Amino acid sequence: MAECRTGELKQKRESGTHRVSGECTGFGQASDGGPNLSWRRVLVGGLLALPLFLHSTNDLDRRYSASLNDVFLDGTQPALKGWMPEPSGVFYTANMDFFYNTFYKNPQAAWRYVLGMEPALMTDADLRIFRRIQLSQYAVSAYEPWVEKMRPPDRIEVACASKPNLPQFEWTNVLAGIWIGRLANSH
């Protein structure tokens, strides 16, 4: 807004040459020079801010609490001794969340992962196996090609409700529905 000089405005008003309905003030200033915090402005601002606040803090579709049930396997835990891959071993998993959480918890681990940051970076053979597992909706039988490749230092993670039917493995249930397998007699 244009700035007016109070003295000029009073002169024009007294002379009658100019009709003015009020005094010229700057934005957010009352005619007396103080701040103009009308209750209407505060109410409108509050009414605009309230839906934004409620939308931002709402746990819609568990957007904030979904990760509370994530599995973070720590290779240093005594309960997992012998169940994590040995040095130079490979961790076979078709679950991206499991990979990210395990990698996050064990960034300096001496093992490798068959599934990395991006499936497109996998070898062609492993990528075909991974896609087959996905297309079968993670059926245990789809893991067979990885099972055939496994060596004693390797481990495999399978997500299923009950112990996977792969008899060549010993299994431990690290969390409800998450099973880690190792070749029998490999420990």
Image (tube, rainbow, N blue to C red):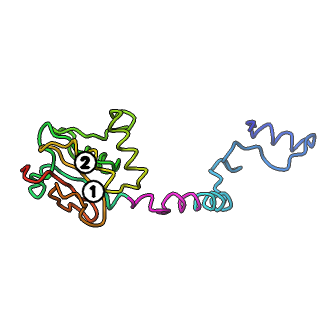
| Earlier residue among tags 2 and 1 | 1
Per the rendering, the mark at residue 187 is none
Report x, y in % for residue 87.
Answer: 12, 39
Looking at this view, name the residue that lies furthest to the right: 17
Please give the range of residues in magenta.
51-66
Q: Residues within 10 Å of mark 1 (few under 14, many from 20)?
A: some
Q: Is residue 15 left or right of residue 174?
A: right
Front in this rendered view, residue 73 or 28? 73
- Residue 162 sits above or below residue 111 on the image: below
Which residue type does callout 1 highlight?
Answer: Val
Asked which quadrant contains residue 26, the reply is top right
Task: Provide the residue designation for mark 1.
Answer: 71
Q: Horizontal and vertical percent for residue 72?
A: 25, 53
Q: Residue at x 12, y 43 (%)?
A: 153
Q: Are marks 2 and 1 in contact (CB under 8 Å)?
A: yes
Q: Is residue 61 magenta?
A: yes
The prevailing secondary structure element of the residues shown in magenta is: helix
Horizontal and vertical percent for residue 36? Answer: 65, 53
Secondary element at tag 1: loop
